[in-house]
């Protein structure tokens, strides 16, 4: 039973990480209808950048500078690469995000090499021991941050003016534009939010498993989370993330560790066959 | 297809011909002769470049049918190449088949697996279907990594011998070059012809508007599966040659990076044109070779600590950046650029029109 709970807590942590990445993808998809394949690579790049910034500026300054970097990264992607593609088929933007992932990977290798580093941040607190289960405090921080990010995003989308503007833009770009909504600014803002989320994700993942090039391999699994929860659902991101994290941890624990990399894709295939729009996704009706 | 002034079709055969004019025939025959005599004066480096380009070309031709014509983006094409490679390797290694018999089997088995992963296309389209191909990449590679270790030998890899035919030994690159180039030429011809027929027109209809296609009587789901079958058949043939060229098959040869690289070739060349595939593959292959050539020189200029990063880093950035630039500035690819150039030349000194 203790081992089971241990697996569950580990699974919840990875679920939290998946949630943070999936939130980034969903944020972008909700307003721009672009599926950002490079989110996992953005997290890796942000983790490396954060590490360097913390080494230079100390923890507080480094994290603030890191968040600024994330926002700048998102803004730059939108302004330089996505804006010229407005009006072209969405698939062009989708392909561009795939290629972007490889550019990030190349930058990572060029600047930091393919070694593994330790994130120079110590999270406050100590690991908890409940019964026979040890819960690392970084795991706790990760889960709490994921839940906090989810709550903040829900409030932002449903209660603030900008959130409403974003949801309206998501419905129909042209209608939103003709109603006078700042569509371009909404696009930039969603990319900036996704960039900042990638920094937060990079921070926790870096603290727990070290900063290295292997991160994006496992982060690609977040794509399964997004489709499991529904492409445009914030709630889907957290539910899907937790489900995938738990299933992965339990399968690795009880069946075989070699299955870890395939689990997200088996789930992905299953959900696409059974319920293509995900658990909470909006079913779109097409017209000719 | 624009033709030079003064070329009129007066018979159906002329209207249907792929090669229409005498200069085009001369160019084609000249090019084929050039390919045939290449090993006489080319060095071993250039020969292996041509062989690898040919193998990649077949795979991208398949991806072009699936993505460029049928409009189903696949980001797991290299996994289908792996299916072909493993079919050849296992049939030769465990069942003592002749290489030539395994080549069509490689194509057929890859097509079967392609249809299997294309089955969700009954319900899915666009982005969602692309995700099934992503899943295909990882599930297929995990299968080769973990299943049937007696046959797949994931850890040690499977050794493959180069073929022999009518007493000719294809073990040397000079001879193997003819195998690859011959098959590439045949596959290019088939692909060019396929897309002009009923199948190709149905593919284009699905790509441009699947609902409209369904309304005019195309069975969309079935033709999507045909698209997967033909595209993956090409991948399988490419895989058979891949196995035979490297003399060895193991899972790390088939990463997702190469699947994406194939897509990049398609974007650079121009989706939905056969000639564009050739331009795209050659363009990105040349960039790759150029980077391998230039990175030791750049490595000497920086500190020894940074030198090993340059090769792999630049290797990835170079092609990804080229593809991004093409997506933004020339989404129709090199094939379109070439048409524009030709048109400019033809209409000079007037304003060009295309």
Image (tube, helix red, strand yellow):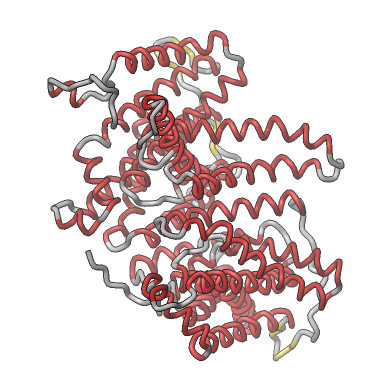
Task: Where is residue A262? Give x, y as percent.
Answer: 51, 60
Q: Quadrant of residue A43?
A: bottom right
Closer to us: B305 or A252: B305
Residue at horizontal 76%, vertical 52%? A111
Residue A147 placement: quadrant: bottom right
Q: Quadrant of the N terminus of chain B?
A: top left
**Which one is in front, A14 or A193?**
A193
Q: Residue at x 74, y 42 (%)?
A: B310
Q: Residue at x 42, y 73 (%)?
A: A177
Image spot of residue A149 (x, y percent): 60, 82
The answer to which of B300 and A276 lies nearer the viewer is B300
Name which residue lies at 76% across and 67% down. Answer: A50
Residue B118 visible in image: yes
| Residue A278 vertical placement versus B1 (above, below) | below
Locate residue B346, reporting x and y percent: 37, 25
- Give the quadrant of the C terminus of chain B: top left
Q: Is residue B3 left or right of residue B167?
A: left
Q: Is B161 placed above or below A94 here?
A: above
Camera-nearest residue between B28 and A228? B28
Residue B66 x %, y %: 35, 45
Question: Would you say A121 lies left or right of A28 here?
Answer: right
- Going by the image, does A136 lie left or right of A268? right
Query: Left or right: where does residue B124 sit relative to residue B39?
Result: left
Vertical arrangement, residue B344 with respect to residue B135, above or below: above
């Amino acid at each position: 039973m203790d081992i089971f709970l241990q697996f569950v807590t580990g699974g919840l942590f990875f679920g939290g990480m998946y949630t943070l990445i999936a939130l980034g993808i969903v944020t972008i998809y909700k307003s721009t209808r672009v599926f950002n394949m490079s989110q996992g690579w953005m997290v890796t790049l942000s983790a490396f950048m954060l590490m360097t910034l913390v080494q230079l500026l100390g923890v507080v300054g480094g994290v603030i500078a890191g968040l600024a970097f994330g926002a700048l990264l998102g803004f730059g992607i939108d302004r330089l690469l996505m804006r010229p593609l407005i009006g072209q088929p969405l698939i062009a933007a989708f392909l561009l995000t795939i290629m972007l992932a490889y550019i990030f990977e190349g930058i990572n290798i060029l600047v930091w090499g393919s070694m593994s580093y330790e994130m120079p941040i110590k999270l406050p607190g100590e690991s908890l021991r409940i019964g026979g289960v040890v819960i690392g405090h970084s795991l706790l921080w990760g889960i709490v941050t994921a839940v906090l990010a989810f709550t903040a995003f829900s409030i932002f989308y449903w209660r603030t003016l900008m959130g409403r503007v974003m949801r309206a833009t998501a419905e129909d770009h042209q209608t939103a534009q003709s109603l006078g909504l700042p569509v371009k600014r909404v696009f930039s803002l969603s990319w900036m939010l996704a960039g900042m989320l990638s920094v937060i994700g990079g921070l926790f993942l870096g603290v727990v498993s070290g900063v290295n090039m292997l991160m994006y391999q496992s982060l690609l699994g977040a794509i399964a989370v997004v489709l499991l929860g529904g492409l445009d659902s914030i709630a889907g991101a957290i539910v899907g993330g937790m489900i995938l994290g738990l299933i992965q941890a339990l399968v690795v624990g009880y069946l075989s560790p070699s299955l870890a990399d395939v689990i997200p894709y088996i789930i992905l295939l299953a959900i696409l066959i059974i319920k293509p729009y995900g658990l909470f996704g909006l079913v779109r009706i097409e017209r000719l | 297809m624009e033709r030079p002034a003064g070329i009129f079709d007066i018979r159906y055969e002329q209207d249907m011909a792929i090669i229409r004019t005498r200069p085009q025939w001369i160019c084609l025959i000249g090019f084929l002769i050039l390919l045939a005599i290449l090993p006489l004066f080319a060095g071993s480096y250039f020969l292996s470049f041509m062989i690898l380009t040919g193998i990649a070309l077949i795979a991208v031709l398949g991806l072009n049918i699936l993505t460029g014509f049928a409009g189903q983006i696949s980001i797991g094409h290299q996994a289908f190449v792996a299916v072909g490679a493993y079919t050849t390797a296992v049939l030769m290694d465990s069942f003592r088949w002749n290489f030539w018999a395994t080549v069509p089997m490689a194509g057929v088995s890859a097509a079967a697996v392609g249809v299997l992963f294309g089955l969700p296309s009954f319900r899915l389209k666009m982005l969602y279907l692309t995700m099934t191909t992503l899943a295909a990449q990882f599930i297929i590679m995990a299968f080769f990594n973990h299943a049937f270790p007696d046959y797949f030998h994931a850890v040690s890899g499977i050794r493959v011998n180069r073929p022999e035919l009518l007493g000719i030994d294809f073990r040397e690159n000079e001879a193997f070059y003819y195998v690859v180039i011959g098959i590439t030429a045949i596959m290019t011809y088939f692909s060019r012809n396929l897309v002009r027929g009923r199948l190709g027109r149905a593919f284009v209809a699905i790509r441009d508007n699947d609902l409209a296609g369904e309304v005019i009587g195309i069975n969309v789901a079935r033709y999507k599966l045909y698209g997967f079958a033909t595209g993956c058949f090409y991948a399988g043939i490419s895989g058979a040659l891949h196995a035979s060229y490297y003399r060895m098959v193991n899972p790390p040869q088939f990463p997702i990076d190469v699947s994406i690289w194939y897509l990049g070739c398609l974007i650079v060349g121009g989706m939905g044109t056969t000639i564009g595939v050739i331009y795209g593959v050659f363009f990105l292959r040349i960039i790759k070779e150029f980077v391998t050539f230039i990175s030791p020189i750049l490595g000497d200029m920086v500190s020894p600590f940074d030198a090993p990063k340059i090769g792999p880093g630049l290797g990835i950035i170079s092609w990804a950046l080229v593809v991004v630039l093409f997506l933004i500035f020339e989404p129709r690819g090199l094939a379109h650029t070439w048409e524009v150039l030709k048109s400019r030349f033809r209409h000079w000194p007037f304003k060009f029109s295309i």
